[in-house]
Image: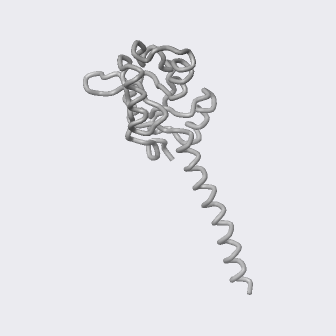
């Protein structure tokens, strides 16, 4: 299954120039733990980084830095890991595991932002698939009991 079929298409994003306070308020308003940092190129959004709630805690709160003077670009994770819409679920999980990230933006063939996928989304999908397999085993046993009476 292509990751583009299951990714969240409603991505909350910020720019490098936005303040940390603006970013934190967006996270609170949209109930998300991350923001994609995007750059606008002729009306198209391209992901250039990601900012997580953990970044805010570790880089700002724990270091006792004032939020008024720091921008998203100052603390965002610049080594961005992305998935293409056509990438498979297994391939995406492998990439996330290899890079140690729980969330990655999903891009199209041109590299522009299309969505985001999180480990929680993938866990839900895999849990549903495992549940389906478990139900299959139960149905097979029931069918066999009826057929062998």
The percent position of residue 128, horizontal first and vertical second, equals 58, 55
The correct choice, above or below, for 140 with respect to 109 in the image is below
The percent position of residue 116, horizontal first and vertical second, equals 45, 36
The correct choice, above or below, for 117 with respect to 50 in the image is below
The percent position of residue 131, horizontal first and vertical second, equals 62, 59
At 57% from the left edge and 19% from the top edge, which residue is drawn? 62
Q: Quadrant of residue 22?
A: top left
Asked whether 7 or 20 is in front, the reply is 20
Q: Quadrant of residue 147?
A: bottom right
At 57% from the left edge and 21% from the top edge, which residue is drawn? 58
The percent position of residue 132, horizontal first and vertical second, equals 60, 61
| Image quarter of the C terminus | bottom right
Locate residue 41 relative to residue 147 in the image: left or right. Answer: left
Asked whether 119 or 143 is in front, the reply is 119
Locate residue 118 relative to residue 98 in the image: left or right. Answer: left
Q: How many marks?
A: 0
Asked whether 125 or 2 is in front, the reply is 125
Q: Quadrant of residue 63?
A: top right
- Name the image colouring: one colour
Residue extending farthest to the bottom is 149
Asked whether 108 or 14 is in front, the reply is 14
At 54% from the left edge and 18% from the top edge, which residue is drawn? 59
């Amino acid at each position: 299954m292509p990751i583009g079929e299951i990714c969240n298409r409603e991505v909350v994003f910020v720019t490098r120039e936005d303040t940390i306070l603006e970013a934190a308020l967006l996270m609170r308003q949209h109930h998300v733990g991350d923001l994609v940092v995007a750059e606008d190129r002729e009306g198209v959004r391209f992901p250039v980084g990601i900012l997580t709630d953990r970044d805010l805690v570790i880089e700002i709160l724990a270091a006792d830095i004032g939020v008024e003077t720091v921008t998203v670009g100052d603390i965002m994770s610049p080594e961005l890991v992305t998935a293409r819409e056509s990438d498979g679920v297994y391939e995406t999980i492998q990439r996330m595991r290899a890079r140690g990230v729980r969330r990655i933006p999903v891009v199209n063939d041109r590299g522009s932002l299309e969505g985001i996928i999180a480990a929680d989304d993938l866990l839900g999908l895999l849990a549903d698939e495992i549940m389906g397999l478990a139900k299959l085993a139960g149905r097979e046993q029931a069918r066999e009991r009826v057929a062998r009476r």
